Amino acid sequence: MKYSTSAHTKGVAALVLSTFLGTLMGVFARYLYVFLSLFQQIYLRFGVASIFGLLIFRKSLNFGKLKNITLKEWFILAIRSLSYAVAAALWVTSVNTAKYANAMFIDSIPLSAVWGVVLFKEKMTVKKAFYLMLAMFGIVLLAVKDYSNFLIWGRGEFLMLVAGVFF
C-alpha cells in the first residue's frame, strides 16, 4: 500500500507530538506535586482535558447516542472508568517517587500486547514473544536497583508497572 507523503508526514508529526506531550505529563505531575495533592492534580488534568476535548471535537459529538447504550456497555464503561482512576493515581504517585527516566521507560511497556493475548485470544507469534520479552528485559535492567537482589524494585517503579496494568 502506497502512502502519500503528506499523510505520512502528518502521521510522523502526530507520533512525535504525542510522544512529546506524553513525556510532558510527568513533568507537569512533578511540578504540580509541590502545589496540589494527588487527587487535585487528577481533577485538574481531567477538567482541562475535558474542556479541550469539547472545544476540539464539538462538531463530532452527539450526546443523543448515550440513550442507546445498553446496561452491559454502561457496566463496562464504569469498570473502565474506575480502572483509569486507580491507574491515574498510581501513575502520578510513581512519577513523583521514582526516577523520571525509569518511570517513563516502564510506562512504555507494551502491556496492550499482553492484554490482547490474554483477553482477546490474539495469536502470539515467536516474533511478538521475542519483542515482548526484550521489552520486559529492558525494563528489568532499568528498574532493578541492586542485581544481587534481582526481584527487589523501587516503590515508584513497581507502582508504574501496576498503573500500566490498570491503564
Image (tube, helix red, strand yellow):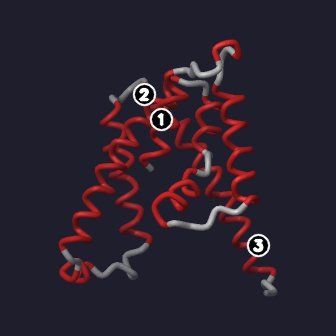
| Mark 3: amino acid | Thr
> Which type of secondary structure does the marked residue at label 1 adopt?
helix
| Mark 1: amino acid | Ala
Residue 24 appears at what percent x and percent y? 58, 43
The span from disc 2 to disc 1 (Cα, nearest Å) is: 6 Å
**Residue placed under numbered mark 3 in the picture:** 9
Q: Earlier in the sequence, mark 3 or mark 1?
A: 3
Give the number of the disc on residue 11.
none
Between 1 and 32, the one nearer to me in the picture: 1
Residue at 65% of width from left, 58% of height from top?
17
Label 1: how many Cα within 10 Å (few below 14, some 14–19, many 20+): many
Label 2: how many Cα within 10 Å (few below 14, some 14–19, many 20+): some
How many numbered marks appear?
A: 3
Residue at 70% of width from left, 44% of height from top?
135
**Is the residue 151 above or below the residue 1 in the image?**
above
> Which type of secondary structure does the marked residue at label 2 adopt?
helix
**Residue placed under numbered mark 1 in the picture:** 29
- Relative to residue 26, is residue 2 drawn left or right? right
Evaluate if marks 3 and 1 touch, with contact meaning CB atoms under 8 Å apart.
no
**Is the residue 99 above or below the residue 123 in the image?**
above
Residue 20 appears at what percent x and percent y? 65, 50
**Is the residue 133 above or below the residue 1 in the image?**
above
> Which type of secondary structure does the marked residue at label 3 adopt?
helix
Residue at 64% of width from left, 52% of height from top?
19
Residue 89 appears at what percent x and percent y? 37, 37
- Relative to residue 48, is residue 11 drawn left or right? right
Evaluate if marks 2 and 1 touch, with contact meaning CB atoms under 8 Å apart.
yes
Give the number of the disc on residue 33.
2
